Image (tube, rainbow, N blue to C red):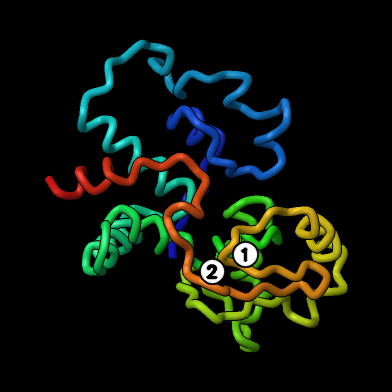
Amino acid sequence: MARYTGPVCRLCRREGTKLFLKGDRCTSGKCALDRRSTAPGQHGAANKKMREYGMQMREKQKTRRYYGVLERQFVNYFEEADRKEGMTGENLICLLERRLDNVVYRMGFASSHKEARQLVLHGHFTLNGKKVNIPSLIIKAGDVITVKESSRDSVKFKALAEAAASHNAPKWLEVKADAMTAKVVALPAREDVDFDFNEQLIVELYSK
């Protein structure tokens, strides 16, 4: 699957908000958005009036970039969310939350979605005891995600386990940092996602 490989700080500047694409750097004084809050490009500093379509497009792009998925993937998630019972926008956000790479990120075993994706691709995690390397895999209630036995003694994962011990995991995850494992005790609900999304704008965009 293709992925974005360009400068990620430009994405935060374009959306005008921190997407936390570089982990700890985003909360430090080195954050590009803190140093230069205008959008990238020659006319980034221009004061442009945002119309309805532009607001909808920016919300879709912000959400897509936060979770690190490409346009075709995002459309597929929206169509699946639309088929489910309930509010389409809420279904969409909760579906994105259930991606395996996002679950690893929420566990505290990665500083960004990008790092979580890489760790999953390299086969460092197991799902219900079986090795898995598909970041887009959708988890279910009762699933158990564990750091692979052969990866636990690495310096990298020892540091990640220490960081995860002080990480505030969402209530739908039961994380045991010392055991490097987490159990999905429930499916994520919209109120469990603390990032500022306006999913209704996305629904309006795709409903045109």
Please state, as top left, top right, bottom left or bottom right, where the C terminus lies in the image. top left
Q: Where, by quadrant of the figure, is residue 82 drawn?
A: bottom left
Q: Which residue is denoted by mark 1 in the rendering?
A: 104
Please tell me how crowded label 1 is: few (under 14), some (14-19), or many (20+) other residues with Cα within 10 Å: many
At label 2, the amino acid type is Leu
Tell me if label 2 and label 1 are in contact, CB under 8 Å: yes
Q: Where, by quadrant of the figure, is residue 92 drawn?
A: bottom left
Residue at image x 44%, y 65%? Answer: 1
Percent across and percent down for residue 206 are 19, 49
> SS at mark 2?
helix
- Seen in the picture, residue 14 relative to 189 is either above or below; the reply is above
> SS at mark 1?
helix
Work out which residue is located at the far left of the displayed protein and give it: 208
Q: Where, by quadrant of the figure, is residue 18 drawn?
A: top right
Q: Which residue is denoted by mark 2 in the rendering?
A: 100
Residue at image x 26%, y 30%? Answer: 54
